[in-house]
Amino acid sequence: MHTGRRLALAALPALCWSATASTERGQAPLRLVTGDLPPMAMPGEPGRRGVLLDLVEAVFKRAELPLQVEFFPWARAMLLAGEQPRTLILPLNRTADREARFQWLLKLYAQRFAFLTLAGKPRVETLEQARQARVGGLRGSSNLASLQQQGVPAERVYQAASIADMHRALERGLVDAIFGSELIHTDAWRRSGRDPAHLHAGLVLESADIWLAAQGGVTEAEAARLREAHEALLADGSVERLFRLYGLKARPEDLR
């Protein structure tokens, strides 16, 4: 890891681990399952495992609770979290059909689904503009259904095979805009070596709150300690600094 980044991480109060870390008496340690979902969660060295996984690990350290993290294909992670008590999962969108199935422990971020365009090109700011534009979407994603529901003609939608394919289509002028997660696209754009200033977000069609959740078994005392630790990290600016380490700008309203 770059020396400056190590120093920045070390300076975060969130990462101060106490030797007295413990769990509730008689309870099994908490386990967290997730998938390879950059920039939210991904395998890597401590402190560089995705902005939301780093955040949750910092919260647990602040709360002095041990946590075991394991990576699985996303479908397997969902199955484990849905069946096994005291098994947490992130990043999980809080939706109506999931509401009664999980304990919702911490809201981590509000993911925005927006139209993105190149700098110097007209932004898509209205639905009327979106319906007239050539739009790139990810094949097989629910974003295509969202475009259809908003009246974007199917013949004007380019179905890309990957995020990278969407970005190439935008640069080559095959589409006027791309539609998807602002967080994921901004991160993928930066990771590919492109200048983040060259990608602009416009109209946000929808947003989804991303949570740390569990099927059950987390005690109220543990949940309260996590909430208190999370609030402390929000209050002292640690959460925003963590997002900046990933080159991401977090709106305060998206973090609560």
Image (tube, rainbow, N blue to C red):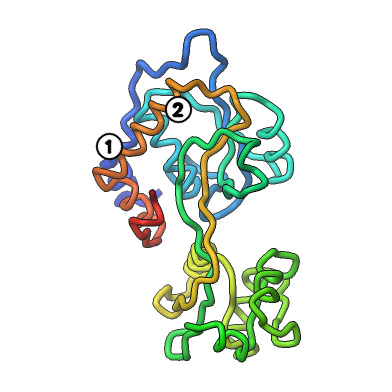
Q: Would you call the spot at circle 2 few (<14 residues within 10 Å), some (14-19), or many (20 or more)?
A: some
Query: Which residue is at 52% across, 61% downward?
Result: 207
Q: Is residue 177 left or right of residue 226?
A: right
When the figure is inspected, residue 113 is found, relative to residue 122, above or below; the finding is above
Q: Nearer the viewer, residue 206 or 233?
A: 206
Residue 66: x and y, percent?
46, 23
Q: Earlier in the sequence, mark 2 or mark 1?
A: 1
Q: Is residue 61 left or right of residue 159?
A: left
Q: Secondary structure at mark 2?
A: helix
Report, in whole angstroms, how far the alpha carbon at label 2 lies from the one at label 1: 20 Å
Give amino acid for label 2. Answer: Ala
In percent of width and height, residue 156 lies at: 70, 87
* Left or right: 115, with 55 as reference point: right
Q: Which residue is mark 2?
A: 223
Kind of element beneath mark 1: helix
Q: Nearer the viewer, mark 2 or mark 1?
A: 2
Density class for disc 1 (Cα within 10 Å; few <14, some 14-19, many ≥20) is some
- Residue located farthest toward the top when viewing the structure as drawn: 26
Quadrant for residue 28, please give it: top right
Q: Nearer the viewer, residue 74 or 151?
A: 151
Q: Residue at x 39, y 19 (%)?
A: 21
- Return the x and y of residue 4 as percentages of the image width and height: 30, 51
Count numbered badges in the picture.
2
Question: Would residue 9 be found to the left or right of residue 151 on screen?
Answer: left
Q: Read off the residue under disc 1.
A: 13
Q: State the image quarter where residue 133 is shown.
A: bottom right
Disc 1 residue type (three-letter): Pro
- What percent of the width, then of the height, locates residue 205? 54, 71
Q: Quadrant of residue 208?
A: bottom right
